[in-house]
Amino acid sequence: MVGEGEREEDIARREAVEKTGIQIGRVELAHAFLPSPDGSSERVVVFCAEADLSTAGGVHGLTEEHEDIRVDVYSAQEAIQLLDCGRIEAGPAVVALSWFARGICCAGWIALLPLDAAVLSPD
């Protein structure tokens, strides 16, 4: 939910810390979509972000929100292969990885290879 006076990018930064324990750097809008336009007004906004994933992993989330989120880190190539073989099913991850795999995102960031992708999974 976007609160009054909040920007979507600020929410992405906050959620990254809550859900992964990772601070993110540069952020780029990947895509926004309606997961169920005929049944809900929910709008999902997906960002790709620069982050140091060297300490990523484990289970995260807010206790008061009953979250239990496992963070797995893969190389970009591994994450795209998991997407291609149907092992990644979470809508936002599918959108972000599809967008990333097409080379649309992070045009100025590509020199930072090798890239890693953090994938969130309900545990």
Image: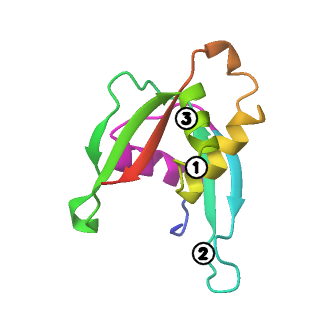
Q: Earlier in the sequence, mark 2 or mark 3?
A: 2
Q: Earlier in the sequence, mark 1 or mark 3?
A: 3
Q: Residue at x 43, y 51 (%)?
A: 15
Q: Residue at x 37, y 49 (%)?
A: 19
Residue type indicated by callout 3: Ala
Q: Is residue 83 left or right of residue 119?
A: right
Q: Viewer-proximal residue, 8 or 50?
A: 50
Q: Secondary structure at mark 1?
A: loop
Could you tell me if residue 7 is visible in this image?
no
Q: Secondary structure at mark 2?
A: loop
Disc 2 target residue: 42
Viewer-nearest of labels 2 and 1?
1
Disc 1 target residue: 86
Viewer-nearest of labels 1 and 3?
1
Q: Residue at x 32, y 25 (%)?
A: 55
Q: Earlier in the sequence, mark 2 or mark 1?
A: 2
User: Is residue 74 one of those drawn in magenta?
Assistant: no
Disc 3 target residue: 79
Alpha carbon of mark 2 to alpha carbon of mark 3: how far?
Answer: 26 Å
Residue 96 in the image, given as x and y percentages of width and height: 63, 46
Residue 26 in the image, given as x and y percentages of width and height: 59, 32
Could you tell me if residue 40 is visible in this image?
yes
For mark 2, does the 10 Å Cα neighbourhood hold few (<14), some (14 to 19), or many (20 or more) residues?
few
Alpha carbon of mark 2 to alpha carbon of mark 1: how far?
Answer: 24 Å
Alpha carbon of mark 1 to alpha carbon of mark 3: how far?
Answer: 11 Å
User: 84 above or below 90?
Assistant: above
Q: Which residues are magenta?
A: 7-27
